[in-house]
Image (spheres, rainbow, N blue to C red):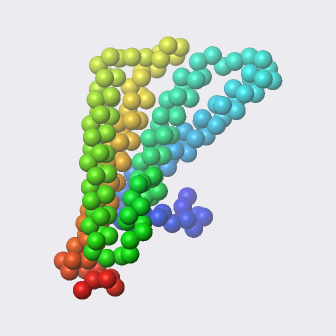
Amino acid sequence: MTEICGYEEPHPVKYNNFFWDLLLRFQRFVIIVSSLFVVASIGATVVLRYIFKTDLYGLEEIVVIFAFWLYFMGGAYGSYTRSHITADIISVAMPEGRMKSVIVVFSSSITFIFSLLFSYWGYDFFMFGVKMSARTPVWRIPMVVSYTAVFLGMIIMTFYFLVDLLADIKTMRGHFGQGSIKTEGSR
């Protein structure tokens, strides 16, 4: 799809291999399908409720499952494009150079460590769903379907944060003369 409209992903690290491509295609597919389902479901609910004075019993359960997948795959995709929310005003305001690269690596390290922690919690959440065998009240859908979105989304985010961290370390090494990157501020 991105080839058709000429849009290029804003991620600084790109790999042209089967795994990378498959992961991105999976995320885009889940995001598009989930978005369409959530919008169509809410639209159908409004039409049925306010025009036909009826309701789709239990639809909310299904919408919540798709919303979980939308949120967490969207978060993972935001991690891929580096468009996720950050609080690194120092690295934005600083000029290019050694100090900025150190701060960026520090920030990327913290992000990766917290992402690992959240992935662990996502795993616990997923295993809780497996052990408890909880189901939705109306349709009896296993809750682990939603919990899987949390765990998988966090795993993918952690993967992208690791890729970003490694790229930032490579950039920092270049600023210190240990790599191939040379910028104006380097000596």
Q: Is residue 1 left or right of residue 103?
A: right
Point 78% across, 23% down: residue: 50
Q: Quadrant of residue 174?
A: bottom left
Q: Quadrant of the C terminus?
A: bottom left
Point 38% across, 25% down: residue: 144
Point 28% across, 52% down: residue: 110
- Outermost left residue: 178
Depth order, front residue of 95/126: 95
Q: Is residue 105 left or right of residue 74?
A: left
Q: Is residue 14 left or right of residue 1?
A: left
Indicate whether 103 appears above or below 54. Answer: below
Indicate whether 139 appears above or below 40. Answer: above
Residue 120: x percent and y percent? Answer: 27, 37
Depth order, front residue of 42/141: 42
Point 43% across, 17% down: residue: 135
- Outermost top residue: 137
- Outermost right residue: 51
Q: Evaluate whether residue 145 shows in this view.
A: yes
Q: Quadrant of residue 165?
A: bottom left
Residue 58: x percent and y percent? Answer: 59, 18
